[in-house]
Image (cartoon, rainbow, N blue to C red):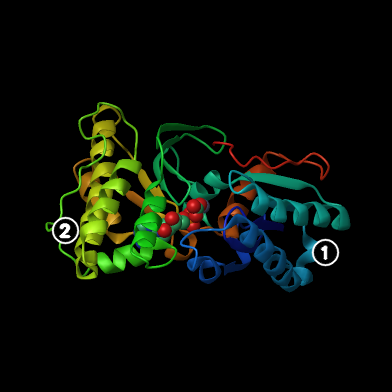
Amino acid sequence: MILSIESSCDDSSIAITEIATKKLIYHKKISQELEHSQYGGVVPELASRLHAIALPAILSECEPWFGELKAIAVTNAPGLGVTLMEGVVMAKALSIALNIPILPINHLKGHIYSLFIEQEALVPLTVLLVSGGHTQLIEVTSYNIMETVATTMDDSYGESFDKVAKMMGLGYPGGPLIEKLALQGDSSKFTFTVPLSQSPLIAFSYSGLKNNVRLSILEAQSEDYPDIAATFQKTATDHLIQKLKKYFKIHPPKRFAIVGGASANLYLRSQVEELLFSYKAPLLLAPLEYCSDNAAMIGRCALEAYDQEAFVAYRDISIQPRCKL
Ligand code: KG4
Ligand code: ZN
């Protein structure tokens, strides 16, 4: 079995995965949303301290499996430096105590493999990764061959929801809060410009839209917030759809997936489904509980890394907060 640790942002999570069957034997996650909510975003120092409490608490439940562990997998990139460190230090300690190697796992690959928990990977695959830290279009050929073909020039899709929610004083994370508020709103009451709509670039940008929304909120009453939320969600999503359409003209999708925390957004899902219809390409989604950060997806990646014997000794693992795929 492999024990996997995830602490790249504000979720402390540990999973145990059986190597022979790919079965997820144990999974637990403690989220810090409540603690960060009053700040409207993740406070790294606070997140790190909360991981230092939550990770050992979860780990204590895993002791019955310690004798059967063949490796410790841990997210070491990308993410917040001070929170990645919490998971990596725990992995080092376990590696020494149990005399087993470490498998360093990339968090973005984790999100992609959240699609394949307890099943074989389906590749090749085109993936839209939308989370708090990333907005990327990725061509996945295999576990080792993944190419980012479009990325954001500034903020990410999920982050823009967080920032708009903060401007409205709604709390954190903003994605589910804005999505819920948007259900009561009318997306035709306001007009926001779709980012980069005149640009031939296949890239994403959310800073201009965020500013657009900020100016509207300054002049609006709180009764207008549902309409602003609905218009913002539509515009933010239209931007993704416009760029996907452009990309698909050159690279028609055969199999498409949306992953990451913001892949839970039902409006986004419905718009992508509609776009894929004419290509007859299936849409793959992870179960809702594995869309946001979790160690089960790290455990699924760890199975691939284990097969490839991508082991690292405890003294050789480092964190790479800004690493890409
Ligand atoms: O993947 P994730 O848990 O963490 C990162 O790796 O960043 O994603 C969290 C992000 C947050 O920005 C959150 O607001 C966003 O995903 N999110 C959503 C929704 N649920 C979560 N964004 C839009 N709509 C949602 N329903
Ligand atoms: Zn994530």
Apparent side of residue 64 relative to residue 108 in the rendered image (left or right):
right
Q: Secondary structure at mark 2?
A: loop
**Residue 214 visible within the image:** yes
Residue that badge 2 annotates: 187
| Foreground of the two, 60 or 189 | 189
For the residue marked with disc 1, what is the amino acid?
Gly
In percent of the image, x 29 and y 32: which residue is there? Answer: 247
Q: In which of the image's four quarters is ligand 1 placed?
A: bottom left
Place of residue 175 in the rendered image (x, y in percent of width and height, measured from the top left): 37, 60
User: Disc 1, ligand 2: is the CB inside 8 Å?
Assistant: no
Crowding at dot 2, Cα within 10 Å, few <14 / some 14-19 / many 20+, comes out as many
For the residue marked with disc 2, what is the amino acid?
Ser
Quadrant hosting residue 188: bottom left
User: Disc 2, ligand 1: is the CB inside 8 Å?
Assistant: no
In percent of the image, x 44 and y 51: which residue is there? Answer: 131
Q: Can you say whether 302 is above or below 154 in the image? A: below
In percent of the image, x 39 and y 55: which residue is there? Answer: 163
Q: Residue furthest left?
A: 188
Residue 157: which disc?
Answer: none
Q: Are marks 1 and 2 in contact (CB under 8 Å)?
A: no
Residue that badge 1 annotates: 67
- Comparing labels 1 and 2, the label whose residue is closer to the camera: 2
Place of residue 57 in the rendered image (x, y in percent of width and height, measured from the top left): 72, 72
**Residue 273 visible within the image:** no
| Foreground of the two, 88 or 181 | 181
Place of residue 201 in the rendered image (x, y in percent of width and height, measured from the top left): 30, 27
| Foreground of the two, 87 or 96 | 87
Quarter of the image containing the C terminus?
top right
Place of residue 230 in the rendered image (x, y in percent of width and height, measured from the top left): 22, 60
